[in-house]
Amino acid sequence: MAKRLTYYILAGLVLGIVVGWAINAAVGDGTAAGDAQLKTIAGYFSILTTIFLHLIKMIIAPLVFSTLVVGIAHMGDTAALGRVGVKAIGWFFCASLVSLSLGLILVTVFQPGTGLGLPLPPVDATVGVDRSAFDLAKFIAHIFPESMVGAMASNDILQIVVFSLFVGVAILAVGEPARPLVRATEALVKVMLQITDYVMRFAPVAVFAAVTATIAQRGLAILGTFGYFMGSFYIGLIILWLILIGICFLIVGSRTSLLIRYIRDPIVLAFSTASSEAAYPRTLEALDRFGVPPRIASFVLPLGYSFNLDGSMMYMTFASIFVAQAYGIELSLGTQILMLLTLMITSKGVAGVPRASLVVITATLAQFNIPEAGLLLILAVDHFLDMGRSATNVVGNAVASVVVAKWEGQLDPLEPVDIEPPHAPAHVPPPAPGDEAF
């Protein structure tokens, strides 16, 4: 089923391009009325995508909570938890630095904003991105939830992670009396993965609708207009994939060559829906089949969704320098490095913020006196760029989980890649030494 689902999603992607192009060619006439009609048609198709993403969001919060709590409960002790956390955060910051630096280097080499040949938006034009969400002080306070119910209702992964950490550590401290709670949470994991299986059957339809809506409204011509910019960015993503997988190969060994095969389903899903979140449940299952113990994957993966979005971070430097190039603003090497360091810090402060990449870019442009209106140049193709960076985020977090598991010496044997995964982790981690209660 997993292999067939990938093919169905790809078929939905191709069919969506064809149908979207046909609608755009039949209805679009370059007039305001034609554009309005295309927008209406795209809106109807988007309903299917919205339903799918709502279903995904429905399962994300309980799935993150249950898998993370069970993972911590099976860690054995808080020392192991702290050790895994330190290794994960260390990898995240190193990967962030690589992603941001690569974006800076490639945009400087390719110069996609130079000689763009398009009318530039007025420097005082409104971008439509809410920069008020970008506030480091508010972010730090926001990490700690006022209500677990509120955090789960808003799907704030970072707050869910914090609460889950408290619950997991408390379970370790309580010991035997908490054993029924652990069993109940393990049952919740199985139930949520079964629900995930139901939801994922709708994925090909959602992908078809999403691509149809985008192509119908934008048309294929927009890809030609920004072809060089998009091509340069995708070359950067390919290089980033090679770097991440290459480093993983050096650390993990030859089995790394099979990693993409194991995570191809979540990669295709993230790319097609332009949503890393949509791929979370399948990524968790794929990592389990690859041999990453649930206790590690369920801890590292949610953290990665807050602190390790490699594709998004590369996009931040790429897009920021692109706008500066488009307006003919020369940035010294020192300024570019300062921008990189600024993005390194601020990119960690918008977890859970809608359109987080654009929020960070807007704030960064303002800080370095680059017209924020330049973002209007790329908003038209942002969806197509988001597809690539969402898929890259999946790769980056999968690599992070595998590397941390290897550092912990806990990579399990591979399971068959093309067999439908069970609706729960393929194995329940054995009790850690001194933790027989669990």
Image (spheres, rainbow, N blue to C red):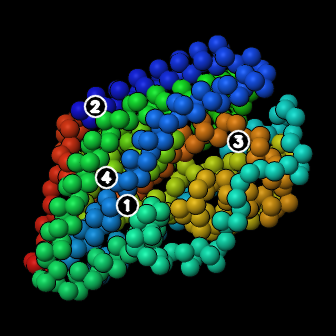
The amino acid sitting under disc 4 is: Leu
Query: What residue is rendered at 59% in x and 26% in y?
Result: 41
Q: From where the camera sits, is residue 321 visible?
A: no
Q: Decide: marks 3, 1 in contact (CB < 8 A)?
A: no
Quick one: quadrant of the N terminus?
top left
Residue under pointer 3: 379
Residue 111 point in image, percent of width and height: 77, 40
Name which residue type carries label 3.
Leu
Above or below 10: residue 294 = below
- Which mark is nearer the camera, 3 or 1? 1
Q: Quadrant of residue 175?
A: bottom left
In which quarter of the view is residue 185 placed? bottom left
Pointer 4 local density, CA inside 10 Å: few below 14, some 14–19, many at least 20: many
CB atoms of marks 1 and 2 within 8 Å:
no
What's the CA distance linking mark 1 and mark 2? 26 Å
Q: Residue 429 or 381: which is nearer the viewer? A: 381
Check if mark 2's residue and mark 4's residue have beta carbons within 8 Å.
Answer: no
Along the line of sight, the residue nearer the viewer: 112 or 366 = 366
Q: What element carries label 4?
A: helix
Residue 429 visible? The answer is yes
User: Which of marks 1 and 3 precedes in the sequence?
Assistant: 1
Answer whether labels 3 and 2 touch (C-beta < 8 Å): no
The amino acid type, in three-letter code, at marker 1 is Ala
Q: Do the residues labelled 3 and 4 touch (CB within 8 Å)?
A: no
Mark nearest the camera among 1 and 2 is: 1
Secondary structure state at the residue bearing disc 3: helix
Residue for badge 4: 284
Q: Earlier in the sequence, mark 4 or mark 1?
A: 1
Q: In this view, does 211 lie to the left or right of 25?
A: left
What amino acid is at disc 2? Lys
Residue that carries the numbered disc 2 in the rendered image: 3
Q: Name the residue under label 1.
A: 61
